[in-house]
Amino acid sequence: MRGDGIGLEIVDSAISLLDSTQQRYGFSLEYTFVPAGDSALKEYGNPLPAKSVEQFAMSDACLKGPVGETVQDINQKLRFGFDG
């Protein structure tokens, strides 16, 4: 989940680091990007659409970038929904 604002830059930097790590240590990761945050609220009417939550549940690990005004909604859904 790339997030909003600076979240885009932070997640892109993290992915760059993960890509370098994969190359150096010989493993591979598969990235799936899901809509979430203020931009998802505008586009889907929900800051954390059900299809995003489903993808989180199917993933071995997730990377969440900072989001804007919808941070409380997203954090609550993820924390309570995934025992975090």
Image (cartoon, rainbow, N blue to C red):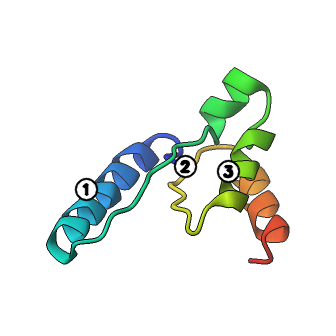
Q: Position of residue 46 (x, y in %)?
A: 79, 34
Dots 3 and 2: beta carbons under 8 Å?
no
Q: CA distance from mark 3 to mark 2?
A: 10 Å
Residue with the mark numbered 3: 55
Q: CA distance from mark 1 to mark 3?
A: 22 Å
Question: Tag 2, which secondary structure?
Answer: loop
Extreme residue in the top direction: 43
Mark nearer the viewer, 1 or 3 = 3
Question: Tag 3, which secondary structure?
Answer: helix
Write down the quadrant of residue 30 in the picture: bottom left
Task: Tell which circle, 1 or 3, labels the residue nearer the N-terminal end.
Answer: 1
Task: Tell which circle, 3 or 2, labels the residue nearer the N-terminal end.
Answer: 2
Question: Tag 1, which secondary structure?
Answer: helix
Q: Residue 24 versus residue 7: which sits nearer the camera?
A: 24
Residue with the mark numbered 1: 16
Q: Residue 1: give its label.
A: 2
Q: Position of residue 81 (x, y in %)?
A: 83, 65
Tell me which amino acid carries mark 1. Answer: Ser
Kindly identify the residue that appears in the image at 58 percent across and 48 percent down: 67
